[in-house]
Image (cartoon, helix red, strand yellow):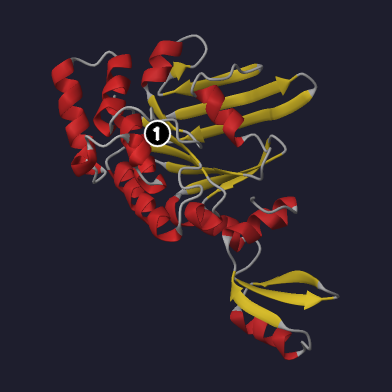
Amino acid sequence: MIRIENLNKYYKSIHALKGVTLHVAEGELFAYLGPNGAGKTTTIRILNGLTTLSSGNAYLNGFNIETHKLQAKQQSGLVPQSANLDQELTVFENLDVHGRLFGMPAKKRVEKIHELLEYVDMADRKDSLTKHLSGGLKRRVMVARALVHSPKILFLDEPTVGLDANIRRRIWGLVKKIQQNGTTIFLTTHYIEEAEFLAQRVSFLDKGAIVAVDMPQNLMRRIGTWAIDRITDNQMETVYFKTREDANKYIGGQKESFTLRRVNLEDAFLSLTGKKVL
């Protein structure tokens, strides 16, 4: 559904994307992870026609984003990092404008909007001005807006940034429901547990280049199952073990304070890049 081949992007002397190649299957929920400045948002902007690529090719549902721009654009919906709703319009009006821009007939547009507002549990707020909504409600409206024209692909760029844990998990449930209905989802996030919980596969991006692509559990198994965080010389060090038995043996010889825990996806990213997903 998403095919990226040797994608490069230059900003003057900065090589922001370095030969990125990815394939995302139909109906897959794919997470695209990396630290600030790695090139995640640049990739999404290119795939959505907001930034031009320097070289390479990319296809959305078979349509080349450069040579068939309009057809490619119709394949996807985008939920950007920052809330970009029209604050002086109601929830319904925001979605209606989006449908009009995609040339949807009036009857079909209104039916779809009502369906989506029920879907995201916002039907009772359809006449509310968006400026009066909380951050979590605005995110739900943005998701609904991105789905008005029934895209086959949904791009989520940091969809839960700044939201509290409870609201974040409600958005997770919505994202899973969208995927279960057959939509392909391309997700960027700094919340590593979000990718670990939601994604079928993840990619690690560092300095504009892909360093790994696999299922989350496979990436974690590469370094072990158990981790011990210990403080030595005022610095934290993490040691990984394949089994709990091996970890217990290590603990027996420790004098410093430590914490035993399960390996997570951020451990896998750290082991490959030496950086945290921040």
Q: Quadrant of residue 28?
A: top left
Q: Report x, y in % for residue 15.
A: 75, 26
Taking 52 as reference, is 150 left or right? left
Residue type beneath disc 1: Leu
Q: Name the residue rendered at 64%, 51% in the picture.
A: 277
Residue at far top of view: 67
Residue 209 lies, with reference to residue 226, above or below; the image says: above
Q: Name the residue rendered at 59%, 62% in the picture.
A: 221
Dot 1 alpha-carbon crowd within 10 angstroms: few under 14, some 14 to 19, many 20 or more:
many
Q: Quadrant of residue 203?
A: top right
Classify the position of the N terminus by image quarter. Answer: top left
| Callout 1 secondary element | strand
Q: How many marks?
A: 1
Q: Report x, y in % for residue 249.
A: 70, 87
Residue 27 seen by the camera: no
Residue at far right of view: 233
Q: Which residue is mark 1?
A: 154
Q: Quadrant of residue 72?
A: top left
Residue 182 lies, with reference to residue 197, above or below; the image says: above
Residue 180 seen by the camera: yes
Residue 44 lies, with reference to residue 181, above or below; the image says: above
